[in-house]
Image (cartoon, helix red, strand yellow):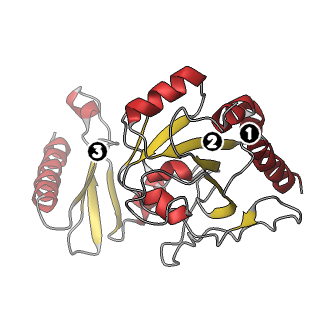
Amino acid sequence: MTEGCEFRDLYDQYDALGVSIVGVSFDSPAENKLFSFNNSFQYELWTDAERELALHYGAASFAQQPFATRHTVVLDDYGRWILTYAGVGNTVQHPNDVLADLTAIFSQ
Amino acid sequence: MCIWILRRQLYLVLGLWTLACSTAPGSRTLNNRGIDVAGGDSDTSVIGITDTASTQGEDIEPDVITMGDSGNEVMEADSFTLPDDTVVTDLNEPEDTSPPPVMPLPDGLVGSLADQTFSPGFVGVVNQDSDMVDPTVLVGSWTVLWFYPFASTFG
């Protein structure tokens, strides 16, 4: 089970909170399209070829980094960077942790 | 008969005067009523109304209306009411477009609190269909961006 599939399986619960999910890598759009098709992702996969997002949010530490660090950020509805999950280890648990954090934020 | 001739001459004078004034600077026209209003620099204006009845042989007095040059009568007639849901903004006051402060976050979150900076104005991001991604899509709803090293990798 990949991290992407776990986000896929929790998609409805994220959607119920009004939260969008986007996967980001340096892969080509064709590679991402195949990845999305093979796993039936409901959300978009973005190609950050110039590392614009990765450098800003900490998923890359230099512009020539060949691949993104496994890393997640949460933005609020104004596009503000609210939460960071650096160095994601347990990729199955991670999407559940993010969902739990968002549920706690919205239910307070 | 004499009165009738005088009346027609009065019409002619008024008509010529109205025509002359309507081409002068400051003249105004109320087309929605079919009434020509002649203004100008004088204190009063004359409104000429076409007397169609007299051409049909009826003996009626011509309608000559005078009004002040300020045009208040016209303004009252042409005033309108805004709908109740119309938002009237004072253009002299700058609109506050700054976002509200971030809501207080609960304790015990797994994620680390970030510095609340805004997303960069990226230009080279495309989706899996090779469509350019507009940075504004990150505004309007909360978003989870999860970065992964390679497509199709496990773990």
Left or right: A106, with B61 as reference point: right
User: Residue at 42% of width from left, 41% of height from top?
Assistant: A27
In which image quadrant can residue B131 be found?
A: top left
Discs 3, 2: same chain:
no
User: Residue at 28% of width from left, 31% of height from top?
Assistant: B53
User: Residue at 43% of width from left, 66% of height from top?
Assistant: A62
Chain ID at mark 3: B
Mark 3 to mark 1 CA distance (whole Å): 60 Å
User: Residue at 84% of width from left, 48% of height from top?
Assistant: A100
Are discs 1 and 2 less than 8 Å apart at CB?
Answer: yes
In which image quadrant can residue A12 be found?
A: top right
Mark 1 to mark 2 CA distance (whole Å): 8 Å
Q: Nearer the viewer, mark 3 or mark 1?
A: 1
Chain ID at mark 1: A
Q: Nearer the viewer, mark 3 or mark 2?
A: 2
Left or right: A52, with A5 as reference point: left
Three-letter residue code for mark 3: Asn
The mark nearer the N terminus, 1 or 2, is 1
Mark 3 to mark 2 CA distance (whole Å): 59 Å
Residue at numbered disc 1:
A14
Three-letter residue code for mark 2: Ile
Residue at numbered disc 3:
B31
Discs 3, 1: same chain:
no
